[in-house]
Image (cartoon, grey):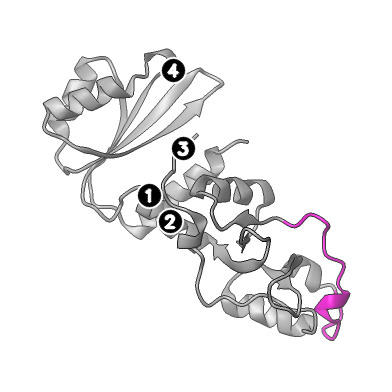
Amino acid sequence: MYKLQGMVVNQIISPGLEPLYPHQQVAEALQSMHRQHVHELPVVAEDHFTYLGIAAEAQLVDLSPTTLIGEVALQQHKPAVSSHANLFDVLKMYQENLLSIIPVLDETDHYVGMITRDGLLEGVAKMMNVQEPGAIIHLQMATHDYMLSDIARLAELNDVRILNVYTLYDTTHDMINVFLKTNRIDVQALVSTYSRYHYQVIQIFAQESSMDSLRDNYDMLMNYINM
């Protein structure tokens, strides 16, 4: 699994997004989803903090436009994450529910906001330090050969600082993929060192990250996470 730690959910709540309320009609709800570029929205009671569930576009399009949201049969399952959860909890929630948004609740289970896919993407970007220039090195090795201290020591010998490490386990083949975010664009000497010490270098991302490449990597991350 990827190690994404240190940032909590309340730091990536998407600002300005509006939930649905029971008094609203289906037509208004669909317009709100379209305007906010999402396929689902949380439904919150008229007290503005009791979370009732999620209304999905796929469900609402089959209903009369004048039907009230309060009359719609919402699923009993009400996916949400705590405002003090970490990014990995959100990734897991997205993977399990395949939603475009994830509602966020505080410690008293009151609704406090939602996280969109782009909001999660921004959080992952911050955790990966993509705003900092530097290459990303993708190594692969047998699980029993993985020693982060050895990998870090070789980087230090080459005057390269590792800004972040995240790992992806291949349980089928008992292999581990290690992604190193470094502080340098030119890491050829370090790559040669890793190869000399029999680490398999899969790929080097040596350019400053763009949002497009980050989205591609995010999609890969979501596809690989398997709970």
Camera-near label (4 vs 1) is 1
Q: Which mark, by number, is residue 143? A: 4
Residue 138 is covered by the magenta coloring? no
Judged from the image, the secondary structure of the residue bearing numbered disc 3 is loop
Q: Which residue is mark 3?
A: 2
Q: Is residue 131 visible in this depiction of the protein?
A: yes
- Mark 4 to mark 1 CA distance (whole Å): 24 Å
What amino acid is labelled 2 in the image?
Gly
- Mark 2 to mark 3 CA distance (whole Å): 14 Å
Q: Is residue 172 left or right of residue 124?
A: right
Above-or-below relation of 142 to 93: above
- Mark 1 to mark 2 CA distance (whole Å): 6 Å
Q: Which residue is mark 2?
A: 123
Which residue is at 84% across, 86% downward? 66
Which residue is at 31% across, 50% downward? 129
What amino acid is labelled 4 in the image?
Thr
Residue neighbourhood size for the residue with mark 1, other residues' Cα within 10 Å, grouped as few (<14), some (14–19), many (≥20): many
Q: Please give the range of residues in magenta.
A: 63-78
Q: Which residue is mark 1?
A: 127
Q: Is residue 43 left or right of residue 107?
A: right
Q: Is residue 39 visible in this depiction of the protein?
A: no
